[in-house]
Amino acid sequence: MEGLGINKSFWQGRSVFLTGHTGFKGGWLTLWLASMGARVHGYSLSPPTSPALFSELHLDECLENSTIADIRDSQMLSRELGKANPSVIFHLAAQPIVRKSYQSPADTFSTNVLGSVNLFEAALQSESVKAVVNVTSDKCYQNLGGNSFFVEEDPLGGDDPYSASKACSEIVTASYWHSFYKGSGIGLATGRAGNVIGGGDWAQDRLIPDFLRALDSQQPLRVRSPNAIRPWQHVLEPLAGYLLIAENACLDAEQWSGAWNFGPNEDDTKPVSWIADFLTTVMPNAEWEVETTNQPNEVSLLKLDSSKARSMLNWRSRWSIQDALTKAVEWHQAWKSGTPAQDISLRQIEEYMSR
């Protein structure tokens, strides 16, 4: 783990409170932390999909405690966080789907904004917390359709409810830092990642899960925005960034707090059609077609500048987009063939670390 900069001994025996542990990114992060010896306390709604990564990884056996509850329940959240007595908090609980945010805007805002407020309040009441990492989104930026890469200082915004909610969460985080956390000895940071992919994602309205479902049912993948350009990356890439933020913020809250981009290399920022073409090339009998029905508005171009993370955290993408897509498909095929999901995932974590 020396090459990546993640210190396994730092996590050995450390109490970690992780919201959203039943989700895709939360499941991978829970397994990674547990594999390094961390005592992980999860707080989340029930697994959002069936099958679910939480169940397939048998994460109930890896966790110190798993609380199924709503992040908007401030009393329950405060009580469970207090019992966990954590030194690090990773906040991943969210409503993460853009199209669902059009269907349920009030739930999206209350979960993604007020949920963050509840967490920050609960953390301030704890005497053990040293670092809080709030996972937001690359979609938090005010996107006017330019061709530049977003940097952390760019204006925040969002037309769709999901993007706007994540911009709000960023503003709330900055407010809590300047008003309450700064000088308290608790680091408070946000992580803005690209479009994550990887094995064990069964969510609706995500390109790779939609492709694998179409492949399994012998149907063509229906693509709604083939020309949209996104920063694609394997799920382990931003998770490595979150771990590095937390480690450093525990040692120096003032220096490592604030916003951090974790995006892929420029060559891996690709249009949706490129991803679909690659997948149909590597998988026999796969094909895709354009969805012709009207779709909710989404930005057409999104790119992240991760220079800050590269220069300060020594973080960088380890897997190309081709690697990431191959790993996602390999995971799915191995799982379908009966290989335990935890074995596949731990092997890929080790492969990633060896890079």
Image (cartoon, grey):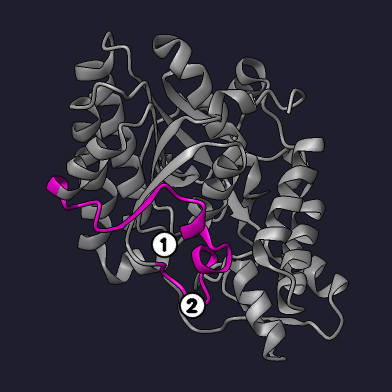
Amino acid carrying label 1: it is: Val
Which residue, given by chain and number where applicable, does mark 1 sit on? 98
At x 72%, y 62%, the residue is 328
Q: Quadrant of residue 287?
A: bottom right
Choose the circle earlier in sequence order: 1 or 2.
2
Q: Quadrant of residue 133?
A: top left
Q: Is residue 272 left or right of residue 189?
A: right
Q: Which residues are magenta?
A: 47-75
Mark 2: secondary structure:
loop
Estimate how packed mark 1 is, as few (under 14), some (14 to 19) or many (20 or more) residues with alpha carbons within 10 Å. Answer: many
View extreme (left): residue: 75
Amino acid carrying label 2: it is: Ser
Which residue, given by chain and number where applicable, does mark 2 sit on? 50
At x 79%, y 65%, the residue is 330
Estimate how packed mark 2 is, as few (under 14), some (14 to 19) or many (20 or more) residues with alpha carbons within 10 Å. Answer: few
Residue 23 lies, in percent from the top left, at 46, 59
Which of the image's four quarters has the N terminus? top right
> Disc 1 versus disc 2: distance between alpha carbons?
20 Å
Whether tag 1 and tag 2 are in contact, CB under 8 A, the answer is no
Residue 292 lies, in percent from the top left, at 56, 84
Residue 162 lies, in percent from the top left, at 36, 55
Q: Quadrant of residue 354?
A: top right
Depth-wise, is mark 1 or mark 2 nearer the camera? 2
Mark 1: secondary structure:
helix
Is the residue 293 above or below the residue 323 in the image? below
Q: Is residue 49 left or right of residue 70?
A: right
Q: Is residue 150 visible?
A: no
Q: Is residue 127 left or right of residue 302?
A: left
Is the residue 176 above or below the residue 157 in the image? above
